[in-house]
């Protein structure tokens, strides 16, 4: 076997010719050139007349063992009338303006999907900000261009990051269980931009929209897809009750400040907010203390639990009855936060019952939320919402990567 053939096999990139190899500071520098003779414009991809040649530059490629490999080539420049002037030529092994080969970028993106920041930067020997740029390019290449086609059941949610100083609006496709759209911001204009991107034809195909009880989103969905059933997912409805319970607890805490009862109450927060079957024995004990000593707070706790139970029903009629009973109870509970919560539930009664009928797996939306939270945490170093968006698409939009592994 000829050495150049061996090297080409070792590099594993098609469409290039190996011209030579040398070692420089422990790096194997492989001189290459594109197999095709005619230069193409990197911007539009068309064959263009040559203009001049730039100095040799390098692209980091996948290493072999502990050996770092870089490809070297002096790219030509072409004069492209279409792109308006002199442009650098396209190379077959790397994206325009990248210092890494496609294979290297794909492996980085793959690792970013499956492992954490420290692992990726250490394994690949690149900075985290570089990972951000690579992820953006890979997503641009690999993201399914038909994400917005055939949407039937969608969900919208806002996502706060950087201590909730910034927000993204995220739209998911319930049928295919993937994120299909994101944008910065969380007001009605942001969500309206989604429907504008979708266009009138695709808006008409939407049958249901799940969301939280944010009035801004409700109005936009009603305007843009009037035929769609709005579904309030139970996760958000239950949060109404949890928030009300927390408010009652804080009120009681204010009244009991400095007393032993107050201190005991302070410790009960998690016992009150957790699901009863998840309580530790200490937490159970705290809960029964609340039951004995603090009647209004225990009433609030039962209200929270009863709402969850009403949403557990699988038959719409039963759920309707349970929810109606809950409304009556909450309204005359003499707990102001629950009276308010009941008002909200009554206002959105149909959409809340629609959840029981449609039974959209909110486990998926919740799971997605947790996943995005994790991603946002990792993307923290990026300082850029576009990088965060790219990370979300990379990990939640069904991008399947096949990095060249042995
Ligand atoms: Zn061009």
Image (cartoon, grey):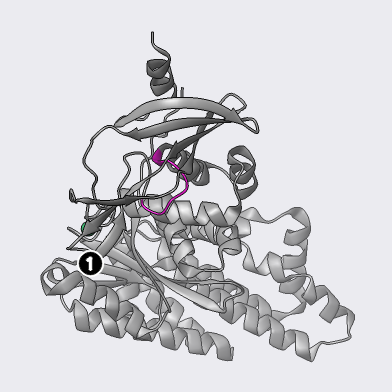
Q: Position of residue 369 (x, y in %)?
A: 48, 61
Q: Position of residue 270 (x, y in %)?
A: 70, 66
Question: Who is closer to the viewer here, 305 or 186?
Answer: 186
Q: Residue at x 89, y 86 (%)?
A: 258
* Residue 98 on the magenta span: yes
Question: Who is closer to the viewer here, 281 or 401?
Answer: 401
Query: Does residue 148 appear to the left or right of 14 in the view shown?
Result: left
Q: Residue at x 77, y 62 (%)?
A: 285
Query: Does residue 169 appear to the left or right of 60 in the view shown?
Result: left
Q: Is residue 161 above or below residue 29?
A: below
* Residue 345 on the magenta span: no
Q: Which residues are magenta?
A: 96-102
Magenta highlight: main SS? loop
Quadrant of the image containing the N terminus:
top left
Question: Who is closer to the viewer here, 354 or 16?
Answer: 16
Quarter residue 276 falls in: bottom right
Q: Is residue 89 above or below residue 9?
A: below
Which residue is denoted by mark 1 in the rendering?
A: 84
Query: Does residue 148 appear to the left or right of 348 in the view shown?
Result: left
Mark 1 C-beta closer than 8 Å to ligand 1: no
Q: Position of residue 267 (x, y in %)?
A: 79, 70
Quarter residue 224 falls in: bottom left
């Amino acid at each position: 076997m000829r050495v150049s053939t061996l090297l080409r096999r070792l590099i594993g990139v098609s469409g290039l010719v190996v011209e030579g190899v040398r070692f420089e500071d422990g790096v194997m520098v492989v001189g290459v050139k594109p197999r095709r003779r005619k230069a193409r414009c990197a911007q539009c991809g068309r064959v263009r007349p040559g203009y001049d040649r730039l100095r040799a530059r390098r692209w980091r490629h996948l290493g072999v063992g502990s050996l770092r490999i870089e490809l070297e080539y002096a790219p030509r420049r072409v004069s492209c009338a279409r792109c308006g002037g002199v442009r650098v030529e396209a190379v077959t092994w790397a994206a325009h303006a990248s210092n890494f080969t496609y294979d290297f970028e794909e492996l980085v993106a793959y690792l970013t999907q499956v492992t954490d920041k420290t692992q990726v930067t250490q394994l690949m020997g690149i900075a985290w900000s570089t990972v951000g740029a690579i992820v953006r390019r890979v997503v641009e290449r690999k993201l399914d261009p038909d994400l917005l086609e055939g949407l039937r059941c969608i969900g919208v949610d806002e996502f706060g990051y950087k201590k909730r100083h910034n927000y993204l609006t995220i739209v998911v496709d319930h049928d295919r269980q993937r994120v299909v759209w994101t944008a910065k911001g969380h007001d009605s204009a942001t969500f309206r931009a989604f429907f504008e991107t979708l266009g009138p034809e695709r808006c008409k195909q939407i049958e249901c929209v799940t969301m939280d009880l944010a009035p801004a989103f409700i109005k936009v969905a009603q305007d843009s897809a009037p035929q769609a059933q709005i579904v309030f997912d139970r996760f958000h409805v239950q949060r109404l009750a949890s928030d009300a319970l927390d408010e009652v607890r804080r009120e009681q805490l204010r009244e009991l400040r400095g007393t032993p009862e107050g201190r005991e109450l302070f410790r009960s927060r998690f016992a009150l907010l957790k699901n009863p079957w998840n309580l530790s024995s200490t937490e159970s004990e705290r809960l029964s203390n609340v039951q004995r000593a603090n009647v209004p707070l225990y009433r609030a706790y039962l209200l929270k639990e009863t709402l969850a139970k009403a949403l557990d029903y699988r038959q719409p009629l039963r759920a309707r009855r349970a929810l109606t009973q809950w409304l009556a109870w909450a309204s005359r509970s003499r707990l102001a936060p629950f009276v308010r919560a009941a008002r909200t539930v009554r206002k959105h009664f149909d959409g809340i019952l629609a959840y029981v009928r449609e039974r959209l797996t909110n486990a998926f939306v919740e799971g997605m939320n947790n996943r995005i939270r994790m991603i946002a945490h990792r993307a923290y170093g990026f300082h850029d919402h576009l990088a965060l968006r790219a990370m979300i698409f990379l990990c939640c939009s069904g991008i399947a990567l096949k990095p060249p592994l042995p």
